[in-house]
Image (cartoon, coloured by chain):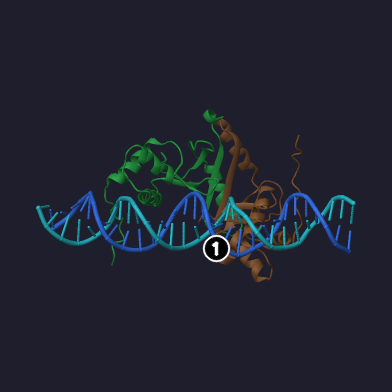
Chain colours: A green, B brown, C cyan, D blue
DNA sequence: TCGGCCATGATAGGCGTTTTCAACAAGGCG
DNA sequence: CGCCTTGTTGAAAACGCCTATCATGGCCGA
């Protein structure tokens, strides 16, 4: 049988650079912005690798992904490992993590009442943050 | 000064066809699916026009738009003119309209508490409907 | 140190969507 | 009713985000 264990990820300069940048950024950013930022600061990294790394991190729950108004995927490292939602600035991407147990229960209940299973949900709040206003 | 009034839309066979199809469809569908469906039923209509028509309708609030897991825009004519949310089947796109005054209040309060203005939000529940399960 | 094997990244491709622009048709007017 | 203006159409091309390809390179266990 196959081990099925967690795939071993090799430690590379590129992954470290993406991870370090994410630690520094408080905002949701697109793969392209992250790539650009890394190149600007002198990191030798390809766009493909940025996409791949972010996707791997997202799959592993290390970063949160959501889609901006244009349908583009944006990424952010969140402090909380728990399930949570975001209050996101439409201008700068700054985000606050939001806990809403009541909303969680509500989604479960509504879905069950309608006979839906395998439930997931998206709850994001967008606005303009104090410093952008 | 310019009138700035609502732009007059010309009544065309194509727009009527899209509108009529939307009235018949209970599910969220992509522009491409809608185009395919119209062609199948013999309507002479171009993909460009379908995209344009759906976008115009969406801008005018005549149809609801959301993005499926792949980031693709899907459209649906909703019964309610009021603000509402959706419980959407991941498999077939079937959707129920959901009213949640408590969630509305919650989003407003959370955003205000964090100093955010011009608030909007997305709240959608996804699952697998009874007939797809 | 050596070698297997995963990671990298330039390039090309896929896919949804928008733009372009010439031909067309809705609808006001004479 | 037919002309004329002007919005509409749609095939084709462009666009933007993202993924697949594959030869090269570097991590890491032996």
Q: Find residue B88 and report its image quarter.
A: bottom right
Q: Residue at x 52, y 38 (%)?
A: A87
The chain letter for the residue carrying disc 1 is: B
Q: Kindly indicate the quadrant of the structure image that contains residue B30.
A: bottom right
The residue labelled by disc 1 is: B91
Residue at left 58%, top 46%?
B122
Which residue corresponds to the image point at 63% horizontal and 41% vertical from the top-left?
Answer: B104
Query: Picture coordinates of residue A104 (x, y %)?
Result: 53, 46
Helix, strand or loop at disc 1? loop
Where A48 falls versus B45 (above or below)? Answer: above
Rate crowding at label 1 as few (under 14), some (14 to 19) or many (20 or more) other CA atoms within 10 Å: few
Q: Position of residue C30 (x, y in %)?
A: 90, 51
On the question of residue B105 being in view, the answer is yes
Q: Work out which quarter of the rendered image holds the N terminus of chain A and state it.
A: bottom left
Which image quarter holds the C terminus of chain A?
top right
Establish if D10 lies above or below B59. below
- Which residue appears at 71% of the width and 61% of the height? B14
Whether residue B117 sits left or right of residue C8 in the image: it is right
């Amino acid at each position: 049988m196959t081990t099925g264990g967690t795939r071993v990820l090799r430690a590379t300069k590129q992954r470290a650079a993406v991870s370090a940048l994410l630690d520094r950024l408080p905002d949701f950013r697109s793969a392209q912005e992250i790539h650009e930022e890394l190149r600007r600061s002198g990191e030798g990294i390809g766009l493909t690798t940025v996409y791949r790394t972010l996707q791997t991190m997202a799959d592993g729950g290390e970063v949160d992904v959501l889609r901006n108004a244009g349908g583009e995927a944006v990424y952010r490292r969140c402090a909380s490992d728990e399930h949570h939602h975001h209050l996101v600035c439409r201008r700068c991407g700054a985000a606050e993590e939001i806990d809403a147990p009541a909303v969680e229960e509500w989604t479960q209940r509504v879905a069950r009442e309608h006979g839906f299973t395998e439930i997931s949900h998206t709850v994001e709040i967008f606005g303009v943050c104090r410093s952008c206003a």
